[in-house]
């Protein structure tokens, strides 16, 4: 299932960062019937006419953790957002791993330029990001310098803990944020701590302590109070949901009885011609049972995210700022759950893991628009800068996608996105640790265009999936390519994997997709 266009968003552009899964199963009955009416009140339909883009609009960014495409049918407020705004069907993350992807979003740079390729340790995580001085220049510092009031709520970068001091007198708050409510390993959504503007606050295990709901309350308060001042604002709400252990809110814990994971064409099927998955056994009965239970938990858990989206939109409307607010919804990466005979996880270059929802709605955004051009998470920082009336920072590798939000698409656009995954998560301390090495791909660099995916592994193996003929990516046809074509793809990968700066990376991305229609 491709990401459906997020339609008219009552003049609010909502960016939701979700973990991207590929085609999913439609819930039993219609998607609307699959979700209880009490799950989240869908906001009223926006008027057909949309105002022109506002000068210096507010920005609401909702970034979720490990949200896959096949969860969207169970989220009525996200579907309403699709109807009200623009959906980017070829949005690709730079790495299907939390910290590298989040660093790319903050900086607007590929992992080879942020230096963050893992969730923790000597080549990844918050401590390295901090020690490299990366926090001194992010989309938050950009917007704060432009006069925006900024707020961060939820999951920051792996290794960050609420009480960490980083040499200062109190719990650390990164530059660029006027309001700060960040957690550490709060994945269970209960019994966690938050750094609340330099003060560590503990939460318990009562229903009112459920983290996604706590973040929603704080976000509503920030929007209401800041809107009353007339000052432009930017808020990022970064949920831990639906990351493992997929804890639902207590009110949602009995929903969707009997729901199973989608049985797509890729379900329990090893792709033909792959090397690292060659000989991979089929899923066992126990694994299938666990996967079905996990999928049901994930669907239950995202109900709280969906309710939050409805609340945020209603708050913007009540505060009188919906017509000058851009709302963005996306995920840090996707997630596989039974596809390709793989149990739960990510890190691969399959669309389940790297092609995630990106929805934007707000002033000047065409309702129901489906944008097919290739965009990536390194494009969000320069997009936010353009909305704020700022030039794109010189260090970014991405480019503003504002021109794709309405009207005709630019005549020239990038041809390919780069995905780079190195030094996979094999440490038991990593929240994305994979116990069975057979489920972890070797390090790789990959190109993803509108029509194909090319993957080059560290051991020299290559894969090429023609996603027009094979949208589920179940047949590697690299062996059918000519030596000249393979050499061209290798050169394109190297060009993108070593580029630095918007101009160089733009040129490399266009060269990588020169065979694409219209390039």
Image (tube, helix red, strand yellow):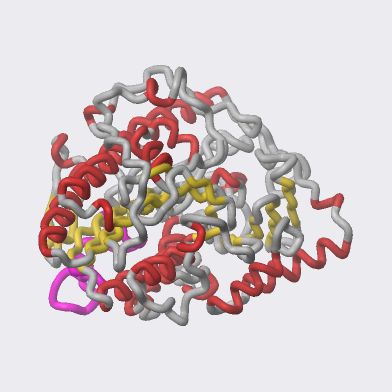
Q: Residue furthest front?
A: 49
Q: Quadrant of residue 176?
A: bottom left
Provide residue 403's location: percent of width, then percent of height: 49, 63
457 over 68 or under it: above or below: below
> Toward the viewer: 78 or 250?
78
Provide residue 194's location: percent of width, then percent of height: 18, 56
Quarter of the picture containing the N terminus is top right
Provide residue 421's location: percent of width, then percent of height: 57, 61
Quarter of the picture containing the C terminus is bottom right
Q: Quadrant of residue 381?
A: bottom left
Residue drawn at point x = 49 percent, y = 30 percent: 291
Residue drawn at point x = 47 percent, y = 51 percent: 333
Residue 161 on the magenta span? yes
Count of marks, rendered view: 0
Q: Quadrant of residue 76?
A: top left
Most frequent secondary structure within the magenta stretch: loop
In screen coordinates, is 222 left or right of 83? left
Magenta region, residue range? 154-178
In screen coordinates, is 183 left or right of 3? left
> Toward the viewer: 379 or 349?
379
Residue drawn at point x = 35 percent, y = 25 percent: 35
Is residue 370 in sight in this rendering? Answer: yes
Residue 405 on the magenta span? no
Is residue 63 in sight in this rendering? Answer: no
Provide residue 445's location: percent of width, then percent of height: 64, 62
Residue drawn at point x = 75 percent, y = 56 percent: 462
């Amino acid at each position: 299932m491709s990401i459906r266009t997020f339609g008219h968003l009552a003049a609010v552009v909502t960016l939701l960062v979700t973990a991207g899964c590929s085609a999913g199963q439609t819930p039993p009955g219609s998607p609307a019937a699959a979700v209880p009416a009490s799950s989240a009140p869908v906001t009223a339909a926006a008027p057909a006419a949309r105002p022109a883009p506002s000068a210096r609009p507010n920005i609401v960014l909702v970034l979720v953790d490990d949200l896959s495409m096949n969860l969207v049918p169970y989220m009525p407020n996200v579907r309403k957002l699709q109807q009200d705004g623009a959906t980017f069907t070829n949005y690709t993350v730079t790495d299907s791993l939390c910290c590298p992807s989040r660093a790319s979003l903050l900086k607007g740079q590929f992992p080879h330029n942020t230096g963050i390729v893992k969730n923790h340790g000597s080549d990844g995580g918050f401590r390295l990001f901090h020690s490299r001085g990366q926090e001194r220049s992010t989309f938050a510092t950009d917007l704060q310098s432009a006069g925006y009031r900024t707020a961060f709520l939820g999951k920051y970068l792996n290794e960050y803990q609420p009480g960490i001091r980083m040499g200062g007198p109190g719990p650390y708050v990164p530059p660029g944020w006027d309001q700060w409510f960040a957690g550490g390993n709060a994945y269970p959504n209960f019994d966690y701590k938050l750094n609340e503007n330099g003060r560590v606050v503990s939460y318990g295990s009562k229903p009112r302590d459920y983290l996604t709901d706590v973040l929603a309350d704080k976000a509503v308060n920030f929007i209401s109070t800041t809107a009353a001042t007339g000052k432009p604002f930017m808020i990022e709400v970064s949920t831990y949901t639906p990351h493992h252990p997929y804890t639902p809110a207590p009110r949602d814990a009995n929903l969707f009885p009997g729901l199973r994971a989608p049985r797509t064409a890729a379900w329990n099927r090893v792709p033909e011609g792959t090397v690292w998955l060659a000989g991979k056994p089929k899923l066992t009965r126990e694994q299938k049972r666990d996967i079905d239970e996990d999928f049901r938990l994930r669907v239950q858990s995202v109900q709280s995210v969906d309710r939050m989206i409805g609340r945020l939109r209603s708050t913007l409307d009540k505060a009188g700022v919906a017509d000058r607010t851009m709302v963005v919804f996306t995920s840090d990466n996707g997630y596989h759950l039974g596809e390709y005979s793989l149990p739960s996880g990510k890190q691969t270059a399959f669309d389940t893991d790297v092609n995630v929802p990106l929805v934007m709605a707000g002033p000047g955004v065409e309702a129901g628009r489906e944008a097919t051009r290739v965009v990536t998470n390194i494009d969000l920082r320069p997009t936010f800068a353009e909305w704020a009336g700022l030039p794109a920072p010189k260090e970014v590798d991405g480019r503003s996608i504002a021109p794709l939000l309405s009207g005709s698409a630019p005549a020239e656009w990038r041809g390919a996105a780069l995905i780079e995954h190195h030094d996979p998560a094999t440490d038991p301390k990593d929240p994305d640790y994979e116990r069975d090495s057979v489920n972890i791909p070797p390090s790789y660099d990959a190109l993803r265009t509108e029509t194909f995916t090319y993957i080059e592994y560290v051991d020299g193996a290559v894969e090429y999936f023609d996603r027009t003929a094979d949208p589920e990516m179940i047949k590697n046809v690299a062996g059918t390519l000519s030596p000249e074509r393979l050499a061209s793809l290798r050169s394109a990968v190297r060009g993108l994997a070593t580029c630095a700066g918007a101009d160089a990376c733009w040129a490399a991305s266009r060269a990588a997709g020169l065979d694409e229609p219209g390039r």
